[in-house]
């Protein structure tokens, strides 16, 4: 084989994939982009417009559930933010509801993600001077202990 023949390649040597393979992943990619966009937009507006932020985090959760089971980290992160936002807004029932949901995902995310989320929530609740809101924090501890152990 001559040196020039050694470096000649034909289109037959490379598999470009089929259009059918690419079409299937496009819808998943679109949903993933939608999840990420909604999540980061909700994070950006949570101080200025917490109610709208809660709506976007809800949308992240519903879209991620439609997608695939591997989207647990987005659901978990959204629930963490929702617990803190609802706590800040004084929505005690929603705090406990979302916190319980968050705890149900602890076995589906990494230990570090779990520790960070619960630590952030405990820090946020612990720094509240409102006694009624601290009662919510005590109730969330009652929910956490059986879930963790």
Image (cartoon, grey):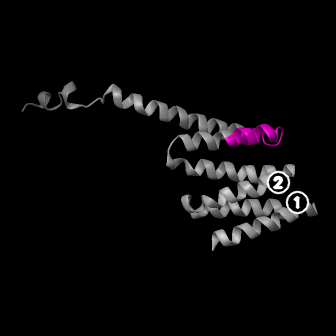
Q: Nearer the viewer, residue 2 or 124?
A: 124
Displayed quadrant of residue 133: bottom right
- Residue 133 - label: 1
- Residue 13 - label: none
- Residue 87 - label: 2
At x 46%, y 30%, the residue is 26
Look at the numbered disc 2 and give the secondary structure of its residue: helix
Magenta-highlighted residues: 42-58
Graded by Cα atoms within 10 Å as few (under 14), some (14 to 19) or many (20 or more), the crowding at tag 1 reads some
Displayed quadrant of residue 10: top left
Residue 92 in sight here: yes
Q: Is residue 28 inside the magenta stretch?
A: no
Say which quadrant the N terminus sits in.
Answer: top left
At x 56%, y 51%, the residue is 72
Q: How many marks?
A: 2
At x 83%, y 65%, the residue is 126
At x 78%, y 42%, the residue is 46
Is the C-beta separation of discs 2 and 1 under 8 Å?
yes
Alpha carbon distance from label 2 to label 1: 7 Å
Residue 9 in sight here: no
Residue 9 appears at what percent x and percent y? 19, 28
Give the overall secondary structure of the magenta segment.
helix
User: Mark 2 vs mark 1: which is more N-terminal?
Assistant: 2
Residue 132 appears at what percent x and percent y? 91, 61
Residue 67 appears at what percent x and percent y? 52, 41
């Amino acid at each position: 084989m001559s040196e020039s023949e050694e470096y000649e390649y034909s289109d037959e040597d490379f598999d470009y994939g089929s259009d059918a393979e690419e079409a299937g992943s496009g819808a998943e990619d679109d949903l993933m982009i939608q999840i990420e966009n909604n999540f980061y937009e909700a994070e950006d507006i949570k101080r200025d417009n917490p109610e709208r932020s809660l709506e976007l985090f809800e949308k992240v959760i519903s879209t991620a559930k439609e997608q695939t089971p591997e989207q647990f980290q987005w659901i978990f992160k959204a629930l963490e933010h929702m617990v803190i936002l609802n706590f800040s807004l004084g929505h005690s029932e929603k705090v406990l509801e979302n916190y319980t949901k968050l705890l149900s995902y602890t076995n589906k995310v990494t230990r570090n993600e779990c520790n960070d989320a619960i630590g952030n929530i405990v820090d946020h609740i612990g720094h509240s001077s409102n006694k009624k809101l601290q009662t919510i924090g005590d109730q969330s501890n009652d929910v956490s202990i059986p879930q963790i152990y």
